[in-house]
Amino acid sequence: MQFGYTIIYVPDVLASVAFFEKAFGLQRRFVHESGYAEMDTGATALAFATHELGGSNLPNGYVKASESAVPLGMEIALVTEQVADAHAKAVAAGAVSLKEPVVKPWGQTVSYVRCPDGTLVELCSPMTA
């Protein structure tokens, strides 16, 4: 078994792709007219798909992060040496700051933002051994 990708169902795939490009400096790897796109994030892709596609995959429904008053109980984490700068850049691009950067007891710096599509993103420094 191998972790392949994470798909986030969103109202507007191209808007989410553009936000992740602007806020986090990621680049689009693949965009399909069916309502699906992938970001270039290394070996494991971050993907976006429309709620319509999500509905066809999950006919009994799901909680839409874009419509939830609070973040879903899951996050994606983006690793950077410059957490404070990344946090500020994401907020300037339209994210909501949920928690300013803090240093955890194990030495990692961590912050949280919520994207316009509802996605919860942890910005964190690399873990050190």
Image (cartoon, rainbow, N blue to C red):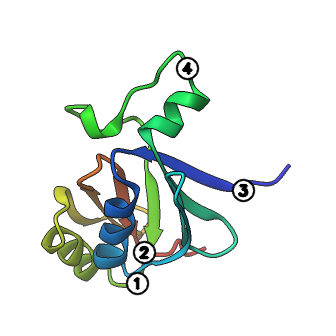
Q: CA distance from mark 2 to mark 1?
A: 5 Å
The residue pinned by badge 1 equals 81
The residue pinned by badge 4 equals 59
Residue under the image location 36 percent in, 76 percent down: 21
User: Is mark 1 in CB contact (under 8 Å) with mark 3?
Assistant: no
Q: Is residue 104 visible?
A: no
Residue under the image location 45 percent in, 68 percent down: 78
| 11 relative position to 4: left or right | left
Relative to 92, does residue 53 appear above or below in the rendering?
above
Where is residue 105, by image quadrant?
A: bottom left
| Camera-side residue of 127 and 24 | 24
Whichever of callouts 2 and 1 sits on the residue coming sooner in the sequence is: 1
- Label 3 residue SS: loop
Could you classify mark 2 by the number of other residues whose Cα lies within 10 Å: few (under 14), some (14-19), or many (20 or more)? many
Whichever of callouts 4 and 2 sits on the residue coming sooner in the sequence is: 4
The residue pinned by badge 2 equals 125
Residue 56 position within the rendered picture, expressed as x and y whole percent measured from the top left: 56, 29
Q: Is residue 68 visible?
A: yes
| Camera-side residue of 69 and 61 | 61
Q: Looking at the image, is mark 1 or mark 3 nearer the viewer?
A: 3
